[in-house]
Image (cartoon, rainbow, N blue to C red):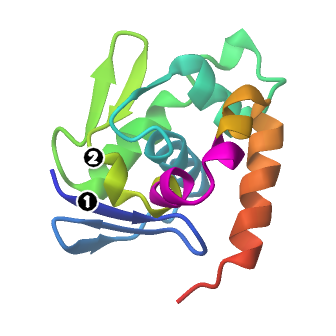
Amino acid sequence: MRGQVRMLGALQVAIEDRPVKIASPRERVVFAGLAIRAGETASHDQLCRALWGEDWSRKRDGAYRPAVSRLRKTLGTDGLVVRESFGYRLDIDPGDVDLLVMGQSHHHGFFQYLGRSSTQKAVEEIKCVMMIVPTR
């Protein structure tokens, strides 16, 4: 599946050259949580933390699933958001996500830091990067 995801600046998504608008804030968070792990499975815990931060409770464990269902409908493509045994995977190439390309080519150490930090620290760092990168 060919996709194009721009996360630096305003979120922009295109699937097979078709622009897709993800309007719901909860769907956007779930999509971002999947996109930063493009091609890899985002666990239930990771998706819950993306939505509710470090203080999420196990009671909310399945509460993100309606957002995933709506996201699948919004994307309009079967097989793009794949259910795995312990989470979901966005089936696109990591090279199609600008944030990951930037991380690989220019800021490898920055993303190594994000991998070791808490979700909240990662979110704050990404917000800082998004503020300095111009949008189109």
- In the rendered image, residue 63, in percent from the top left (x then y), is placed at 58, 26
Kindly identify the amino acid type of the residue bearing the numbered disc 1.
Answer: Gly
> Residue 23 in magenta?
no
Q: What SS does tag 2 mark? A: loop
Pointers 2 and 1 in contact (C-beta within 8 Å): yes
In the rendered structure, which segment of residues is drawn in magenta?
101-111
Q: Residue at x 57, y 60 (%)?
A: 106
Q: What SS does tag 1 mark? A: strand
Label 2 neighbourhood size at 10 Å, few (<14), some (14-19), many (20+)? Answer: many
Q: Where residue 32 is drawn, which disc sits there?
A: none
Q: Residue at x 53, y 61 (%)?
A: 102
Give the left or right position of residue 92, taking residue 99 as reference: left
Does 39 sit above or below residue 125? above
Give the left or right position of residue 93, taking residue 25 as reference: left
The residue singled out by tag 2 in the image is 92
Q: Residue at x 43, y 20 (%)?
A: 87
The residue singled out by tag 1 in the image is 3
- In the rendered image, residue 22, in percent from the top left (x then y), is placed at 44, 63
